[in-house]
Image (cartoon, helix red, strand yellow):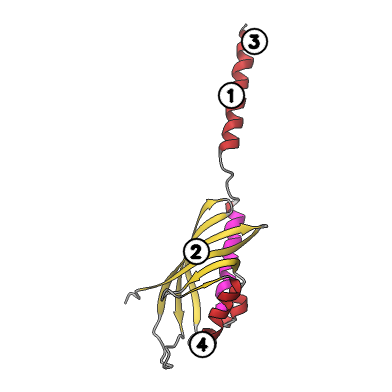
Amino acid sequence: MKGLANVLCTLAVILCAMEAGMSAEPRATEPRDEISIRNVLKGLAEAWNKHDAEAFSMAFAEDADFTNVRGKSAHGRSDVARFHAPIFATIFKDSSLKIDDVRIRFIKPDVAAVDEWWEMTGARDQHGQEIPLRRGLLNLVMTKHDALWAIAVMHNMDLPVSP
């Protein structure tokens, strides 16, 4: 009887462990996924600094949503490229974007919330006057499809520049 009790106890422990393993949501491979996300954001900044709207849009998912600091939006990768092409040729043609900090929180293994603080110099207003240093925050939802991360939703905001 004692042997049967031990077997039943061992089976119960195994079943509990299996149930816990099956019900627990799998964790993202955070180091590899975090590196991939940071590489997407690095490519986004590099494309901005080359003023290349097509390359900039490649960081976005095919059905992405983008909203700029003034609340204007674009839907879809091709619309993101069309949205940025004229401003890269005018008010942002001499701009330089620098990423200050990136924070990533994995919501699920294939979904991440990302905050990215940025600084920009060289931007001009509609009259050609240089705009002083700008600082802002990009709030992103990124998703992973076929091992590739892309921006699904981006909201951009200006932040006050401290003295």
In the foreground, 127 or 120: 127
Residue wearing tag 1: 13
| Highlighted range, magenta | 31-48
Q: Nearer the viewer, mark 1 or mark 2?
A: 2
Sequence order check, earlier mark of 2 and 4: 4
| Distance CA(mark 3)–CA(mark 1) | 15 Å
Mark positioned earlier in the residue sequence (1 or 2): 1
Distance in Å between CA atoms under marks 1 and 2: 41 Å
Disc 3 is placed on an element classified as helix
Q: Is 134 in front, or is 87? A: 87
Amino acid under disc 4:
Asp
Disc ID at residue 94: 4
Q: Amino acid at mark 2?
A: Leu
Label 1, label 4: how far apart the Cα atoms are: 64 Å
Task: Write down the quadrant of residue 24 in the picture.
Answer: top right
Decide whether the magenta segment is chiefly helix, strand or loop.
Answer: helix
Q: Kindly report the distance in space between the C-alpha atoms of the residues bearing marks 3 and 4.
A: 79 Å
Tag of residue 140: 2
Q: Secondary structure at mark 2?
A: strand
Amino acid, disc 1: Val
Is the residue under label 2 in contact with that under label 1 (CB below 8 Å)? no
Residue 145, percent across and down?
64, 58
* The quadrant where residue 126 appears: bottom left
Q: Residue at x 61, y 31 (%)?
A: 18
**For the residue carrying disc 2, how many other residues have a C-alpha within 10 Å: few (<14), some (14-19), or many (20+)?**
many
Q: Which residue is identified by label 3? A: 3
2 or 3: tag closer to the N-terminus: 3
Q: Going by the picture, which residue comes out furthest to the right?
A: 146
